Image: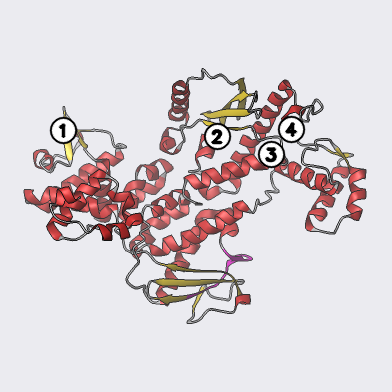
């Protein structure tokens, strides 16, 4: 920056904004722009990428004159560029009104043979965002399909960063209602740590937050009651207070006949069950960000609580077996079928807890169906433990069988869980997007000083009408990762062409952690956490 500016840069101020500037100034391109701006004004350009791109475009078109004419032509080209998924545009496909030679002088687009393209794709996205704001394109078309919203998501992100809250109610509401998973990523890119100078009145803040939280509830569907404070069928009333850039919210235990209430002092602690105090960032869409942060916090707590997904049989069977094992005081390595008569005797002596009550109901159901045992829900061991390692109770062949059956359950349960519980988010959760798939697993037995068995695995997408499949092979150090990645990418482009940019081209190596209690739950919760982190819904 100092080299570009040619004068002294106040390093102390930069270090003071280190975290906020990291995403921009660590990019050499943005550092150059910041140096130029400082040279002209003796001030910093800003903390957001939008400010840098806007400055670049102004610097490019201003010397040419006819700024608005050239700028509008650039916006039209950008719209075409985004619509074609950032592929080069044949000149003959552009409107005849575009003066291509004048536009080329800006340096923002390049000419190659009979095609034009943007040197910097982010500039095209910024111009496309401006086209949305100027209504050069009808944005309603973005929300017709997932493929369209994916295409336009970066332009929408930039548009949101330069919009009023009223504009966001018209545009962003559509994203939240249909694609709340993508909405989280748009908000993350618009979060600014620089505090707002002052908030609107508490009443205005209350109305805006109420609008946002009800919109999130609509988008999250079944999941809403797990992450939004509900009183039966209604969202609980929140009390709100504003002090400068600080916003205080107390979520009450009940719906009190109104969405929110403005207060000047905190309510009694026994009246509310969740509160938050936060400094609000310098952006007009802060109500969306504040409400999302609440949902993200509660989503993380929800997953950490290991919720019981009782509608899924495979998870239910594992859950009830684990309760029964603990009631009988058997260790985590116990794998035998459990006699219902023996279990009932132990239950008579057990404390009357909710878990015991649930198990008693399950025993009654099993007996009515003619069962006399609670079966171990997975593959049982076939040999005695000799060395003390838990996996030694399984022969090689039995281990392969165990891996196949457990992971077949895992991919099928995960697919159904996402589709029935995480409805609003499943359309962007990476592992879910890959399913149905063939899960290729390379198995390696532990040897020598490192006895723990490991697996490496990857998904190859299948047609949506096909079933999940598990293929287990002996691990080979000669595995060609380049070919594996090519195969994964080919399966995505073949079977998921409209969402290819959201699907992970990945290869995972891990310990074979299937020998402890509730292995299916562990796999499911691990995948949930990874997917939710990848789309920005939990930290």
Q: How far apart are marks 2 and 4 (CA)?
A: 31 Å
Mark with earlier residue (3, 2): 2
Residue 192 is left or right of residue 519, and the answer is left
Mark with earlier residue (4, 3): 4
Give residue 55's position: percent from left, percent from top. 19, 53
Q: Distance between the residues labelled 2 and 1?
A: 41 Å
Q: Residue 7 carries which label?
A: none
According to the picture, the residue beneath numbered tag 3 turns out to be 519
- Circle nearer the viewer, 3 or 1: 3
Secondary structure, mark 4, is helix
According to the picture, the residue beneath numbered tag 1 turns out to be 111
Give residue 217's position: percent from left, percent from top. 52, 59
Secondary structure, mark 3, is helix
Mark with earlier residue (2, 1): 1
Q: In this view, does 170 lie above or below 492?
A: below
Q: Distance between the residues labelled 4 and 1?
A: 64 Å
According to the picture, the residue beneath numbered tag 2 turns out to be 435
Mark with earlier residue (3, 1): 1
Mark with earlier residue (4, 1): 1
According to the picture, the residue beneath numbered tag 4 turns out to be 390
- Circle nearer the viewer, 4 or 3: 4
Dot 3, how many residues are within 10 Å of its Cα: few (below 14), some (14-19), or many (20+)?
some
* Range of magenta residues: 229-240
- Circle nearer the viewer, 3 or 2: 3
Give residue 346's position: percent from left, percent from top. 90, 50
- Using the rendered image of the protein, determine whether residue 224 is visible from the camera's viewpoint: no
């Amino acid at each position: 920056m100092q080299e570009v500016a040619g004068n002294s840069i106040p390093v102390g101020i930069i270090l003071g904004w280190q975290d906020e500037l990291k995403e921009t100034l660590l990019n050499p391109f943005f550092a150059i722009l910041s140096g130029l701006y400082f040279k002209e004004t003796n001030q910093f350009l800003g903390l957001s990428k939008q400010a840098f791109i806007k400055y670049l475009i102004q610097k490019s078109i201003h010397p040419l004159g006819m700024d608005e004419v050239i700028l509008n032509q650039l916006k039209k080209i950008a719209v075409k560029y985004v619509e074609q998924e950032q592929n080069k545009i044949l000149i003959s496909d552009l409107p005849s009104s575009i003066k291509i030679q004048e536009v080329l002088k800006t340096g923002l687009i390049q000419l190659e043979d009979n095609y034009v393209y943007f040197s910097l794709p982010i500039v095209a996205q910024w111009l496309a965002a401006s086209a949305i704001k100027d209504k050069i394109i009808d944005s309603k078309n973005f929300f017709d399909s997932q493929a369209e919203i994916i295409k336009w998501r970066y332009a929408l992100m930039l548009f949101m960063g330069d919009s009023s809250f009223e504009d966001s109610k018209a545009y962003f509401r559509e994203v939240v209602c249909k694609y709340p998973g993508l909405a989280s990523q748009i908000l993350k890119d618009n979060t600014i740590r620089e505090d707002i100078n002052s908030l609107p009145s508490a009443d205005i803040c209350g109305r805006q937050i109420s609008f946002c939280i009800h919109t999130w509830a609509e988008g999250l569907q079944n999941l809403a009651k797990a992450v939004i404070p509900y009183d039966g069928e209604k969202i609980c009333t929140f009390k709100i207070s504003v002090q400068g850039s600080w916003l205080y919210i107390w979520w009450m235990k009940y719906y009190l006949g109104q969405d929110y209430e403005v207060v000047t002092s905190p309510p009694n602690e026994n009246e509310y069950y969740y509160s938050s105090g936060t400094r609000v960032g310098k952006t007009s869409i802060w109500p969306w960000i504040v409400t999302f942060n609440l949902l993200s916090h509660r989503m993380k707590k929800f997953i950490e609580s290991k919720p019981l997904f009782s509608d899924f049989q495979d998870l239910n069977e594992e859950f009830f077996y684990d309760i029964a094992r603990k009631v009988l005081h058997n260790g985590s390595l116990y794998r035998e079928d459990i006699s219902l008569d023996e279990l009932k005797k132990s239950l008579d002596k057990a404390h009357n807890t909710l878990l015991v009550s649930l198990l008693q109901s399950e025993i009654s159901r099993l007996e009515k169906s003619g069962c006399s045992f609670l079966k171990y829900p997975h593959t049982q061991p076939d040999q005695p433990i000799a060395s003390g390692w838990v996996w030694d109770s399984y022969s090689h062949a039995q281990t392969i069988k165990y891996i196949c059956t457990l992971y077949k359950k895992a991919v099928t349960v995960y697919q159904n869980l996402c589709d029935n519980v995480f409805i609003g988010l499943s359309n962007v959760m990476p592992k879910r997007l890959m399913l149905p798939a063939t899960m290729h697993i390379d198995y390696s037995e532990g040897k020598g000083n490192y006895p723990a068995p490991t697996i490496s695995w990857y998904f190859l997408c299948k047609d949506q009408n096909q079933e999940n499949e598990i293929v287990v092979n002996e691990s080979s150090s000669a595995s060609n990762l380049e070919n594996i990645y090519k195969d994964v990418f080919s399966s995505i482009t073949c079977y998921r062409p409209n969402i290819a940019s959201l699907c992970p081209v990945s290869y995972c190596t891990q310990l074979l952690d299937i020998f402890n209690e509730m292995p299916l739950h562990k796999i499911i919760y691990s995948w949930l956490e990874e997917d939710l982190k990848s789309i920005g819904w939990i930290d």
